[in-house]
Image (cartoon, rainbow, N blue to C red):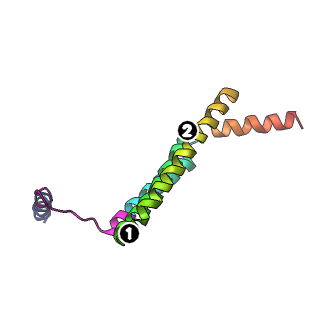
Amino acid sequence: MVGNRLQKFKYLVNEALKPGSVVTVSMEIQLLFAALLFLTGLTGFLVRRNIIFMLISIEIMLNSAALVFVIAGSHWMQADGQVMFIFILTVSAAEVSVGLALILRMYHQYKTLDADALKKLLDRKETENP
């Protein structure tokens, strides 16, 4: 049973590697990949406490959303998905530049990038100076 599946897999790989052959992936698999990518970013954002890792996780989520636009655009043979991807990429680049500038400022001022420690420092600062 396993040997038969392995032979079928080898045959499919050899067919896909022939010059001029086109391999298509179903839209469901592509959307599943985008969803897994989004969940990876969401998990990273919720679990990590380092602000840089949180920013990277947001970038992963934005890229997965952009991937969905490209998938939909290619499915309906429209360029709209790629145009939206470029807009998302532009917003993402602006977000990273502003986010990194704010992170550097916070690090220089508070000497930490841990989100929980920053919250404690800011809460303590508020109670000292009402």
Magenta run includes residue 41: no
The residue indicated by pointer 1 is 78
Q: Residues within 10 Å of mark 2 (few under 14, many from 20)?
A: some
> Could one spot residue 66 in this view of the protein?
yes
Residue found at x 14% / y 58%: 13
Q: Quadrant of residue 15?
A: bottom left
| Range drawn in magenta | 15-31
Asked if residue 52 is positioned above or below residue 76 in the image, the reply reads above
Q: Amino acid at mark 1?
A: Gln
Residue found at x 70% / y 28%: 109
In the displayed orientation, state which residue is furthest to the bottom. 76
Q: Distance from label 2 to label 1 (Cα)? A: 35 Å
Quadrant location of the N terminus in the rendered image: bottom left
Q: Residues within 10 Å of mark 1 (few under 14, many from 20)?
A: few
Does dot 1 land on a helix, a strand or a loop? loop
The residue indicated by pointer 2 is 52
Asked if residue 106 is positioned above or below residue 61 in the image, the reply reads above
Percent x, y of residue 93? 52, 45
Left or right of 80? Residue 50 is right
In the displayed orientation, state which residue is furthest to the right. 130
Q: Quadrant of residue 80?
A: bottom left
Percent x, y of residue 16? 15, 59
Residue found at x 73% / y 37%: 120
* Mark nearer the N terminus (2 vs 1): 2
Q: Quadrant of residue 71?
A: bottom left
Percent x, y of residue 101? 61, 35
Q: Amino acid at mark 2?
A: Ile
> Could one spot residue 51 in this view of the protein?
no
Circle 2 or circle 1, nearest the eye: 1
